[in-house]
Image: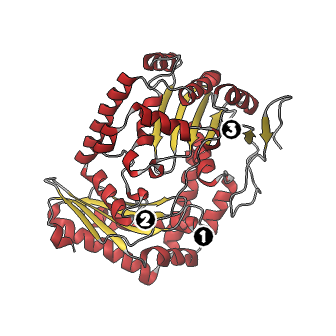
Amino acid sequence: MVPVAAGAARVAVVAVAADPIATLAGAEPTIESTELESGIRVITERMPEVRSASVGCWVAVGGRDEADESAGSSHFLEHLLFKGTARRSARDIAEAVDARGGETNAFTAREHTAYYARLPAGELGFGLELLGDVLADPAFRPHEIDTERQVILEELLLSEDEPDERAHTLCFEGLFPGHPLGREVLGSADTIEAMTRADIAEFHAAHYRSSNLVVVAAGQVDHGEVVTKVEANFPTGPAGIQPVRVAPGGTPVAVTALRRPTEQAHLTVGWRAFALHDPDRYPLAVLNQVLGGGLSSRLFQEIRERRGLAYSVYSYPALYSDAGAVMVYAGTAPGRLPEVRRLVDAEIERLLADGITEREITVAKGYLGGSTVLDLEDSGSRMSRLGGSITARGAVTPIDVHLERIAAVGLDDVGRVIERVFAGPRTLAVVGPVDPDALA
């Protein structure tokens, strides 16, 4: 159990909670966890060898948790919270962070929103106090809302001007038609223009409350100090509304295309997968690495290295609480699009027919294990691991357990996932100077 200071209003929990298929064997003793009486979960990882501290707050609400008419609310809030509080202006925040040599940032995903700061270790208290202030007491000054509204509208225009990004968005729309998982996280020009200060404040009041907050810190940090600062500075009122999510149904759209006068044609192919809690997520990671996850992957070697048909070609999984996807992307000259499409199809057919080889699985598992270890040398990466794991799964899988699961993946496991994912229907999305009728 985690030590609790006398008189503190908190509930101690085990240092690293088990996920649905985990054991606590090998749990890192440097990770500590406390759930406050307010419902806020506080997770820290001590790295005594570094001189930095990364602190963040993960909010368990994202782009999929908004009504259609308020799409983009989470992202709008992300833009606004560092714009000022009742006690601080946006300039005050920027100067205070710069004066300490630190940095702040935030991002919005489909199932969570995150706010974080990276600072010298001695400024940990300031970082927590600042995060608590912007999360609990945003000013929502009308002129700042109008300014950020214009910034977001520009961001939406920028996303329209980036055809590779648009191809990914189209593919998600086709995979999950009519469902929030298929919707643009930024919202739309119509919803952003219509959003009022009252709408934004209401969304914040409903969701930015204790039961949806996970506060994480990594680096040269003291768990007791972090808990004390969170108790003093973060929301302690009503628990708030937790998102109610409905899994996507329906059938993916076979082809979606957007004609654009671009120099390249941007191809994205997607298949529905499974949820992030599924034990097959480890074989899927290995499979993705073989297919298009790295320089030695099949798609990279065949399409770029051997044939020179694309500069950028890759695959990736995207897993959520109740659904998932596997995506393949390539950008190529319009005249070469049919050949690239044929090669992608051929690799998928080859996987379904023959699976992967012993050599491929060895290389993939070596990369995944090694990159996991290298990623954790930075306090910011460790903070992100804590925040993402707790928000998504309610637990942090110990590194040793994670590495053991990767190492345990066998050819039969990968073969099972190949059938689960690639035997199902797919969505093809293309952006560029192409004839949509020719893609059917």
Residue displayed at 60% across by 38% down: 209
Alpha-carbon span between mark 2 and mark 3: 32 Å
In the shown orientation, is residue 157 left or right of residue 370? left
Badge 3 crowding class, 10 Å Cα cut-off, few under 14, some 14 to 19, many 20 or more, is many
Badge 2 crowding class, 10 Å Cα cut-off, few under 14, some 14 to 19, many 20 or more, is many
Residue 106, position as x, y percentages in the image: 47, 36
Residue displayed at 47% across by 29% down: 81
Return the residue at label 3.
44
Q: Earlier in the sequence, mark 1 or mark 3?
A: 3
Question: What amino acid type is highlighted by mark number 3?
Answer: Thr
Compare residues 153 and 106 and report the one nearer the observer: 153
Alpha-carbon span between mark 1 and mark 3: 30 Å
Residue 407, position as x, y percentages in the image: 62, 65
In the shown orientation, is residue 362 left or right of residue 271? right
Return the residue at label 2.
326
Looking at the rendering, which quadrant does residue 152 occupy?
A: top left
Nearer the camera: disc 1 or disc 3: 3
